[in-house]
Structures are given as structure tokens and as C-alpha cells.
Image (cartoon, rainbow, N blue to C red):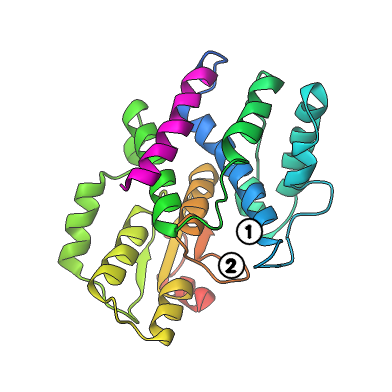
């Protein structure tokens, strides 16, 4: 982890200790960060130099959170989660079944204004913001040891397995039980490190078509989706190579045909 990402992780993680006094678990905290980071990054990408059309409906976006506080902020945040959770595609994946786990509007306001809004996440390199989020997931797994293995395989073990398989450009990596995406991201890192002179087409394939993941648990898939986005995986339109489903419920060949 770089010094920049380590500093951001520490900053966000220190605030988690404050929220523990309100009864919020580590996992709940990372989920709330996911919702707010998505809204902040969507707002950033709607402005120059990106000027992309935002997928967030007007009135449910990041600026609408910034201009509220107290009980009004609390109610509005809850409405945002409910409204976006009804949408399809990526919004449904990130916000589906989302709930506000904050107990104190002032603490929600502080996270929005003092921690997330002060960073420009879109300008930040994928290495820094991806490592920062991955660091939070790892800390969560360490501090919630019971059941952590369900979604967080130790990264040294993942690295060893990926080193043995040695993925290459234009090859596809599939994980039918991807958790928060550790194997997919390690494969991505391996290819970018070992093949620094990839062609434009190879880089496009790596970003948009090289990875396929399935995750049965929606909450875990939500974390995986944000992890992929922060690491720069997915199409420019926001499509991610992630399916929330039981990968063993049908013929494996059907999954690849649908993903193609």
C-alpha cells in the first residue's frame, strides 16, 4: 500500500472508531462509505474535464446531501438510498437493499463534509483509491474474524495463486465466488505489472472484458463492485463484469454466453 492510500485508510478508519460508539459495525461502516463514495464520484465525473452524464437522478445526488444537515440530512439520505435502490443495473447493484446505519446526523454530516468531500476521488490514481478501499476491507476482515473468510481470502495467498497461474493480456479470468474481488484484482495487478507495454486494444480488453465474477450475497457484491470501480475495472459507461447470482445454479457455459 502506498503512503497516500495508507493515509486515507487511516483517516477513514479512525472515524470508524468514533462510529462504533453509536453501535455501527465495521462492515456497516464500509457499506455506508460505499454509498457515499459512489455519489461523490458520480458528481465529480459529471463536471469538467469528464462532463459525463450522471446516472444519479436530480435531487438525489451529492450536492443535495451537502446542502442539508441535522434531521433533514438524515431523512434525505434515507430517501436517496431507497430511491436509488429501486433502479436497475449498477445503481441497483450498489444501492439495492441499502439502509442508513447512522444514529447521529452530525456524524453523517462530518463523514460527508470533512472526510469524503475534501478528496477528489476521480483525480486520485486507481492505485491510491483502490488500495485505500482494499485496505478498509482488509481491516474489516481482521477485526471481524468470525465469517471473514466468506468474502476476504488473505491477500498473500491470492497473490501466490495468481503468480502460479500467470495471467496474460487478452486472457479472461473468472471467479465464480468472487467475494470482494480479490482474485480478479490481483490478476489485474499481475498483468499490468508484468506487461507494461500492452497495446491500446490489450488495455481496453483488460479494463472491459478480461474479468468475470459471480457473488451470491448482495452485500458482498456491493463491496466488490465498488472495489472494481476504484481499481479502474469496467466500461466507461459504468458496466461491471459482476453478476449477483449462484454461479452453480445452471450450466457454467450459460454464464459465459450471457457475459459475452
Give the residue drawn at x 39%, y 45%. 5
Q: Is residue 202 visible?
A: yes
Element assignment for label 2: loop
Give the residue drawn at x 39%, y 60%. 176
Give the residue drawn at x 22%, y 55%. 159
**Which mark, residue 90?**
1
User: Where residue 234 sits: x, y (%)?
Assistant: 51, 67
Q: How many marks?
A: 2
> Mark 2–mark 1 contact, CB under 8 Å?
yes
User: Where residue 240 sits: x, y (%)?
Assistant: 54, 64
Of 113 and 161, nearer the camera is 113
Compared to 47, does 95 lie above or below?
above
Q: Which residues are magenta?
A: 1-19
Label 2 packing within 10 angstroms: few (<14), some (14-19), many (20+): some
User: Where residue 40 sits: x, y (%)?
Assistant: 65, 48
Q: Is residue 13 magenta?
A: yes
Element assignment for label 1: helix
Query: What whole-number distance in Å separates the C-alpha atoms at marks 2 and 1?
Result: 7 Å
Compared to 196, does 150 lie above or below?
above
User: Where residue 2 sits: x, y (%)?
Assistant: 32, 48
Q: Is residue 169 magenta?
A: no
* Helix, strand or loop for the magenta stretch, by majority: helix
Q: Is residue 232 left or right of residue 44?
A: left
Among numbered discs 2 and 1, the one appearing first in the sequence = 1
Quadrant hosting residue 172: bottom left
Q: Is residue 93 left or right of residue 256?
A: right
Give the residue drawn at x 18%, y 63%. 163
Q: Is residue 95 left or right of residue 231?
A: right
Quadrant hosting residue 99: top right
Q: Is residue 144 left or right of residue 112?
A: left
Quadrant hosting residue 148: top left
**Residue at which label 2 appears:** 239
Amino acid at each position: 500500500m502506498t503512503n497516500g492510500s495508507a493515509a486515507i485508510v487511516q483517516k477513514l478508519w479512525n472515524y470508524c472508531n468514533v462510529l462504533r460508539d453509536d453501535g455501527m459495525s465495521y462492515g456497516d461502516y464500509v457499506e455506508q462509505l460505499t454509498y457515499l463514495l459512489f455519489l461523490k464520484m458520480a458528481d465529480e465525473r459529471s463536471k469538467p474535464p469528464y462532463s459525463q452524464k450522471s446516472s444519479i437522478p436530480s435531487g438525489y445526488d451529492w450536492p443535495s446531501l451537502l446542502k442539508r444537515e441535522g434531521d433533514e440530512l438524515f431523512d434525505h439520505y434515507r430517501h436517496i438510498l431507497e430511491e436509488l435502490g429501486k433502479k436497475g443495473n449498477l445503481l441497483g447493484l450498489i444501492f439495492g437493499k441499502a439502509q442508513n446505519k447512522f444514529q447521529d446526523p452530525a456524524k453523517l454530516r462530518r463523514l460527508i463534509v470533512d472526510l469524503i468531500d475534501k478528496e477528489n476521488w476521480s483525480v486520485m490514481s486507481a492505485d491510491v483509491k483502490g488500495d485505500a478501499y482494499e485496505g478498509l476491507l482488509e481491516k474489516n476482515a481482521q477485526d471481524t474474524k468470525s465469517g471473514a473468510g466468506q468474502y476476504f481470502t488473505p491477500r498473500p495467498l491470492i497473490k501466490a495463486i495468481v503468480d502460479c497461474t500467470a495471467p496474460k493480456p487478452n486472457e479472461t479470468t473468472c471467479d465464480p465466488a468472487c467475494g470482494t474481488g480479490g482474485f480478479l484484482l490481483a490478476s489485474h495487478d499481475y498483468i499490468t505489472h508484468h506487461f507494461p507495454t500492452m497495446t491500446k486494444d490489450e488495455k481496453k480488453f483488460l479494463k472491459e472484458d478480461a474479468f468475470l465474477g459471480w457473488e451470491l450475497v448482495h452485500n458482498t457484491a456491493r463491496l466488490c463492485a465498488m472495489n472494481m470501480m476504484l481499481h479502474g475495472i469496467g466500461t466507461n459507461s459504468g458496466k461491471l463484469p459482476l453478476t449477483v447470482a449462484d454461479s452453480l445454479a445452471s450450466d457454467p457455459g450459460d454464464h459465459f454466453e450471457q457475459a459475452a
